[in-house]
Image (cartoon, grey):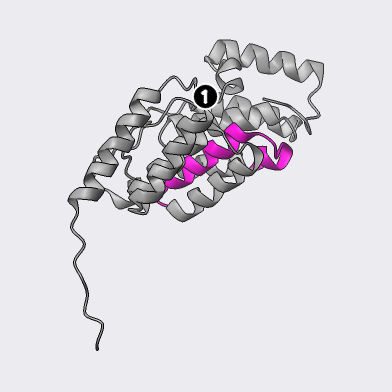
Amino acid sequence: MTARGSSTSSTTWAVISIACLVLGLAVGYVVFGHRSAPPVVTPVPPQQAPASTGAPGGGLLDERAVQTLRDILARDPKNVQAVIQLGNLYYDAGRYAEAVAPYRQALALDASNVNVSTDLGTALYYSGRPDEALDQYEKSLAIDPNHPQTLFNQGIVRLDGKQDAARAVQSWEKLLATNPDYPERARVQQLIDQTRQKMQATPVAPVRSTK
């Protein structure tokens, strides 16, 4: 992940490094897109589900870590790493709506960060906003048209958020076509096959043309 737009001083970096070490917030976790592993298949936004949902996360929020990052940002508002970490804390605690603002702030500082853009889209989806999620994924693909995690997530949201099976398959087929070394190829192919089977099994009835 790039850090363009950050005015982080050497002293602040030292503070971040120490805070990350002590609080378990590894910077490398962000560099590779800490949510870059595919999310749970067929997730359900909390606002549209009963008590139990398919959305990941839901752990306890580390309030001390949140305060440490807020203290850093009070001194250095353009510290993009700290803003991303703040969003990650809320996301991992299952507090997706609260992750949205930090991720948007991070993108305001570094608009080229495709991982943060996609994490923002996923946080929007789990906040019950599938249309906004898909809009955000399009912005991610404008940065990197073949970004594998964006394509994977786009397929999930198209299928489960919009019930658009055909376009979900399009997303996953593009993922496999443009990322031959994608480590979850077998899983994605299984999703494609299962979705196609459901499409074929769903009868389409003719409709009356007169009123």
**Residue 50 seen in the current view:** no
Displayed quadrant of residue 85: top right
Q: Main secondary structure of the magenta part?
A: helix
Which is nearer the eye, 158 or 173? Answer: 173
Residue 206 position (above or below residue 111)? below
Residue 103 position (above or below residue 2)? below
Q: Residue at x 22, y 75 (%)?
A: 207
Residue 170 relative to residue 26: left or right: left
Which is nearer the eye, 129 or 98? Answer: 129
**Residue 143 seen in the current view:** yes
Residue 173 lies in the magenta-colored region? no
Q: Residue 193, how many percent across, how many down? A: 28, 36
Q: Residue at x 59, y 16 (%)?
A: 28
Residue 60 relative to residue 207: left or right: right
Residue that badge 1 annotates: 34
The stretch in magenta equals 105-128
Q: Residue 1, how many percent across, how many down? A: 67, 25
Displayed quadrant of residue 12: top right
Q: Secondary structure at mark 1?
A: loop
Residue 106 lies in the magenta-colored region? yes
Task: Give amino acid for label 1.
Answer: His
Q: Residue 46, how many percent across, how many down? A: 34, 46
Q: Residue 80, how many percent across, how many down? A: 69, 31
